[in-house]
Image (tube, helix red, strand yellow):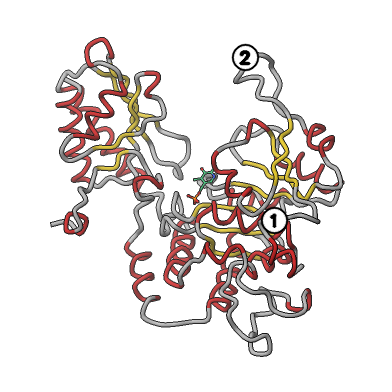
Amino acid sequence: MSIYQKFGVEPIINACGSVTRLGGAPMPVEVLESFREAAAEWVPLEQLQAAASRKISEHTGTEAGLVTSGAAGALTLGAAAILAGHNLKRMEELPHCDDFPDEFIIAREQRSGYDHAVRAAGARLVEVGFNEIVSNAGVRRTESWEYAAAINENTAGIVYVHAADSQPVLTEVVEVAREHGLPVLVDAAGEVPPRSNLKAIAATGADLVSFSGGKAIRGPQSTGILCGKRELISSAALQMLDMDDHGQLWEPPADFIDTSLFRGLPRHGIGRALKVSKEEIIAVLTALEMFASGAYDAQNLEFRSWLEMIGEELELANVNATCYLVTPEGSERYPSLEIQIDESALGSAFDVCQNLRRGSPPIYVGHARLQEGMLTINPVCLTAEYARVLAERLCAELK
Ligand SMILES: *Cc1c(COP(=O)(O)O)cnc(C)c1O
């Protein structure tokens, strides 16, 4: 019996990928083993986070880093670090920013539910640009002069959401920020692979970059990474760590938290609710090491063979659908299978998707393109056995 069944929950076949809603990415055995080992001993968290900082620096080429509660937690802490710096009064006041700059500039087209994480620190978002292409009322994307024009004495920083086709490119936004002495906080949650982005995004000069630990890196789904300028990471760490100690006893590693920048000891900060455990820290560092070394690449060939098998089974069963194997360039990204269903024979793709979820075992497929009558199969959370069951259930459902 599954551990989940013991608690009355039915496990599913996740053909949707490493999404939070369904439990994140599969953790390699090495990662799970490191979690278990880490649970058997105790360490001061500021020392562990300082060690994490050194490891993250190595992989990202940044001055410092912090393990956070997801990329979302990294965005809240990054914004808090920019807002408060090492001003202990400001740390105490967040998320209220009554007498200091609190505006973060963001392109209107980059807004999403994830920017709630930035606002949670106290930041007020100021939108620039339009979304003319989506509204079919223009041909231009956001331009860097629009960021420059929005800067005033209340501006605290710039938020930038990194995607392959983000406009303007990050280097241009960093240039505008530099001219005005402002920091740039980058949401790069899902921007690896390619592995090169671990270093390339921060190499633009962006001050802080956040990555998910529980997507392609395959750490615990509750983890993330914030990396960047030493002084900002020091502030973020101060606002996250459990601060219930005496000032005269507390000795954080000097390369991690610069105690010369403040007098006294802050109490628990806004990030105290975003804690990560020693086990999670060790597990995501182990996963980062594996991801950065390319240890996951070989599996992409196996993923491909499962998807080909599913495509062949569906063809043999003569279902009312056509399969397309999508194979990205290079060895770092895994393939996916797109299933274009014949909606005149099967009903809407939404209904097909719902029926798969309600079946036994429940099956969750990628649902980003249901509007176009397309189901997507993402292999990253499958196993050879799951792939066989998935093929059978799809054959039955799409007949
Ligand atoms: C997934 C994602 C996040 C949140 O990452 P978590 O690690 O789940 O907190 C933030 N921003 C973007 C663009 C994402 O895709």
What whole-number distance in Å separates the C-alpha atoms at marks 1 and 2? Answer: 38 Å
**Residue hosting label 1:** 96
Q: Looking at this rendering, what residue extends furthest in the bottom direction?
A: 248
Question: In the rendered view, does 389 fall on the left or right side of 54?
Answer: left
Where residue 98 appears, as percent x and y from the top left, is 76, 54
Question: In the rendered view, does 220 fall on the left or right side of 204?
Answer: left
Give the residue drawn at x 24%, y 37%.
Answer: 363
Asked whether disc 1 touches disc 2, contact meaning CB atoms under 8 Å apart, the reply is no
Give the residue drawn at x 24%, y 35%.
Answer: 357
Quadrant location of the C terminus?
A: top left
Q: Residues within 10 Å of mark 2 (few under 14, many from 20)?
A: few
Question: In the rendered view, does 160 fall on the left or right side of 157?
Answer: left
* Vertical placement of residue 262 versus 5, above or below: below
Q: Is mark 1 within 8 Å of ligand 1?
A: no
Q: Amino acid at mark 1?
A: His
Where residue 54 appears, as percent x and y from the top left, is 60, 70
Give the residue drawn at x 40%, y 20%.
Answer: 371
Give the residue drawn at x 79%, y 52%.
Answer: 101
Name the mark on residue 337.
none
Number of marks: 2
* Vertical placement of residue 57 versus 131, above or below: below
Where residue 6 appears, as percent x and y from the top left, is 17, 58
Quadrant location of the N terminus?
A: bottom left
Q: Earlier in the sequence, mark 1 or mark 2?
A: 1
**Residue hosting label 2:** 136
Q: Amino acid at mark 2?
A: Asn
Q: Give the image quarter of residue 114.
A: top right
Q: Nearer the viewer, residue 335 or 72?
A: 72
Q: Secondary structure at mark 2?
A: loop
Which numbered mark, 1 or 2, is in the foreground of this view? 1
Q: Secondary structure at mark 1?
A: loop
